[in-house]
Image (tube, rainbow, N blue to C red):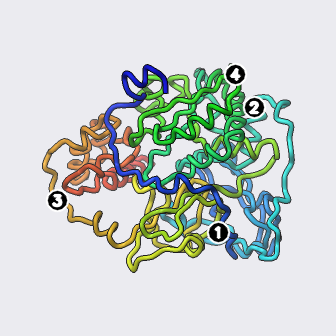
Amino acid sequence: MGLIDLLFGLKSFTHGIHPPYHKDTAGKPIRRLPFPSQLVLPLNQHIGKPAIPLVRKGREVVRGEPIAKADGHFSVPLHAPATGRVRTIELMPTPRGPKSDAIILDVYEGSTQEVLWKQPREMSDLSAEEIIRAIQETGMVGLGGAAFPSHIKLIIPEGKQVDTLIINGCECEPYLTCDHRIMLEHPKALIQGIHYAMRASGASQAVIGIEDNKMDAVEVLRGNLSKGSPVRVEAVETKYPQGSEKMLIKSLLNREVPAGGLPADVGVVVNNVGTLAGLGHLLPEGRGLIERVITVAGPGIVKPGNYLVPLGTPVRHILQQAGYEGARTEFILGGPMMGPAVSAMDTPLTKGTSGLLVLNEPSIEEESNKIWPCIRCARCVSACPMYLNPSMLGQMAAKRKYEEMAQDYHLNDCFECGCCSYVCPSNIPLVQYFRIAKAINREQAT
């Protein structure tokens, strides 16, 4: 931490909230979870067109083998997370809610589950365009939760120029610590992935932003940087939602992304630490994304920790391995602020799933208070990092004035961080109202 930070406070943005962070699993090293007997692999694990199956019922596949190809440029392929046999392709539950086509893979229990499909490449020989193509071939998406195809993020729009790559190591959601452990345990892969992303995007410098409740990660990464490196590590204030792209850009560079704009509009590309550490591993070996680290935590979990889990692992299997307690429980994929709740135990872990949070009876009862009318206290206005008026938006949503919410009150600038719902003393589910309004506006626009 520099002298300026000590004198004037850590780098940050205005507004936001400070929820209890519950980072109890931060000291638990990453451990591999046993393979389940069956994997459920949705073809739409990313934003964009779903992948197209390359396999059919009865086909044997080996771990790492491509089993679905990208459907065009705005799509990514899917690889077999385990050696086994394709049972079928059918509609299955997904973390997003609606059922979607998924490859059901029966895992061979006697297999060593060694990665048998890979095509090593010499990364130093590749051009920026070839690196971007190689990233798409890995099937990598943003592992922070958005699941945006990683190769698309690194393609700079025509007329734009990027000078800085920001690496998001904030992990500001309560309970989640998987990114923290990746920074501590895989610093070399992360730094290698950063250099690949810089070459692909043309950025001349990179900044790793990490909240100051992870100073051990700050020191580890600084210790792995060579003298004169274009990469630097900055500690930022621990505050939610510090990990949002626009907030982190403001905190680290004091640049403001315009309404409706992209980070590239201010010369920036943002990637998650897990994404780049994954690319650091996968690109030289020519392998696909077949597993990821997740945090399994919450008051209902018996053995909380950070686990390396094959993609497609059902929630039921994770819970059997980690153990959970409580007659009434709520399961959340991701963090409590933005993660969706799931009820189907067949729901699989997908590329964008960063955690499994289990709340038991006391936690549920604490959060299930009655909804009261808005008292116009303006706490939501003071908390909103995008300077919106959630109270007014909520009242307009109640009157179903969805178009006016977007046109006059900048509904689409809301990225659904949940700050407004968290601070509301009337327990109004504002974020849910906004999601409904956006969905209706999208339907009417098509």
How many neighbours does mark 3 have within 10 angstroms: few (below 14), some (14-19), or many (20 or more)?
A: few
Q: Which mark is residue 40?
A: 1
In the image, 400 versus 98, the foreground residue is: 98
Q: Label 2's element?
A: helix
* Amino acid residing under circle 1: Val
Tell me the quarter of the picture where residue 403 sits: top left
**Which callout, 1 or 2, points at the residue further toward the start of the chain?**
1
Contact flag, marks 1 and 2 (Cβ < 8 Å): no
Disc 1/disc 2 C-alpha distance (Å)? 33 Å
Mark 4 vs mark 3, CA separation in Å = 57 Å
Residue 142 x/y as whole percent: 59, 46
Q: Amino acid at mark 2?
A: Glu
Q: How many numbered marks appear?
A: 4
Question: Which residue, given by chain and number where applicable, does mark 3 sit on?
Answer: 372
Residue at left offset 49%, top offset 74%:
324
Q: Which residue is mark 2?
A: 129
Position in image of residue 285 (x %, y %): 82, 46
Mark 4 to mark 1: distance in Å? 45 Å
Residue 76 in sight from this viewpoint? yes
Q: Is residue 118 above or below residue 301?
A: above
Question: How far is mark 3 from mark 1, CA to CA?
Answer: 41 Å
Question: Residue type at mark 4?
Answer: Lys
